[in-house]
Amino acid sequence: MTERVLLYSSHPITLEELSPLIRALGGSVVTPDSNEYRVLGSIEQGERYIIVSGEPDPRELPTKFWEDYQFANEELTVSKLGARPRSSFHIEIGYGPKSGLLAVELAYQCALRWPCVVFAEEAIGAERKDGWIVKIYTQQIVYTKEDMERLRSEGKAFTSYGMLD
């Protein structure tokens, strides 16, 4: 099925600002050679991992953000963030058991420093016809800093993907 985890901030978080957080969680940073939306770094802990993608410096492309296909559920996201986002990061959750916890930890650390929310979309079912999937039903949730703190303390993640033992 499908899952998406996107971190949004009303602060234009740059790779320079994000790098110390990625490294503090045991990750590595990739220095992109252009200003395109791309892989910025990854965090690995044993079999668990996440990959972080986004704009290295969203301040340089302020109008591009609103044209970006990554912006999801604008009304709910803006409502929970309290402002229009100025930066976003896609957090790809790995296959390893409990990889989703790394996404929660990174997002929570970001939310401690900047105004942030996480948009998570998870497939919860599918309609099939003649052996083909014709519709995927999803659940969309926007998590605030308080929600992230709760997930973190309960050992839960934004989606069930990457959480199986």
Image (spheres, rainbow, N blue to C red):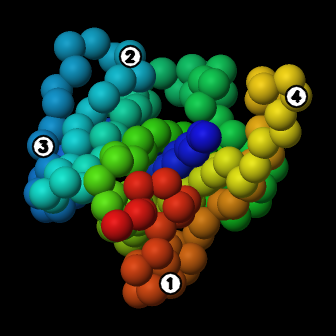
- Sequence-first disc among 2 and 1: 2
Instruction: Name which residue lies at 41% across and 63% down.
Output: 164
- The image position of residue 33, as x and y in percent, is 20, 14
Q: Depth check: 2 or 110 in front?
A: 2
Q: How far separated are the C-alphas under marks 2 and 3?
A: 19 Å
What's under tag 2, amino acid-wise?
Glu
- Sequence-first disc among 3 and 1: 3
> Which residue is the site of mark 1?
150
Count neighbours of disc 3 (C-alpha within 10 A) and say few if under 14, some if 14 to 19, many if 20 or more: some
Q: Residue furthest top?
A: 34
What's under tag 1, amino acid-wise?
Arg
> Which residue is the site of mark 2?
36
Q: Quadrant of the N terminus?
A: top right
- Sequence-first disc among 2 and 4: 2
Q: How far separated are the C-alphas under marks 3 and 4?
A: 44 Å
Q: Quadrant of residue 104?
A: bottom left
Q: How far separated are the C-alphas under marks 3 and 1?
A: 27 Å
> Which residue is the site of mark 4?
129
What's under tag 4, amino acid-wise?
Lys
Taking the image as drawn, is residue 123 in sight? Answer: yes
The local secondary structure at tag 1 comes to helix
Count neighbours of disc 2 (C-alpha within 10 A) and say few if under 14, some if 14 to 19, many if 20 or more: few
Instruction: Name which residue lies at 84% across and 39% down.
Output: 127
Classify 140 as above or below 163. Answer: above
Q: Quadrant of residue 2?
A: top right
- The image position of residue 55, as x and y in percent, is 39, 29
In the image, taking residue 94 as reference, residue 32 lies left or right, namely: left
Classify 37 as above or below 43. Answer: above
> Which residue is the site of mark 3?
28
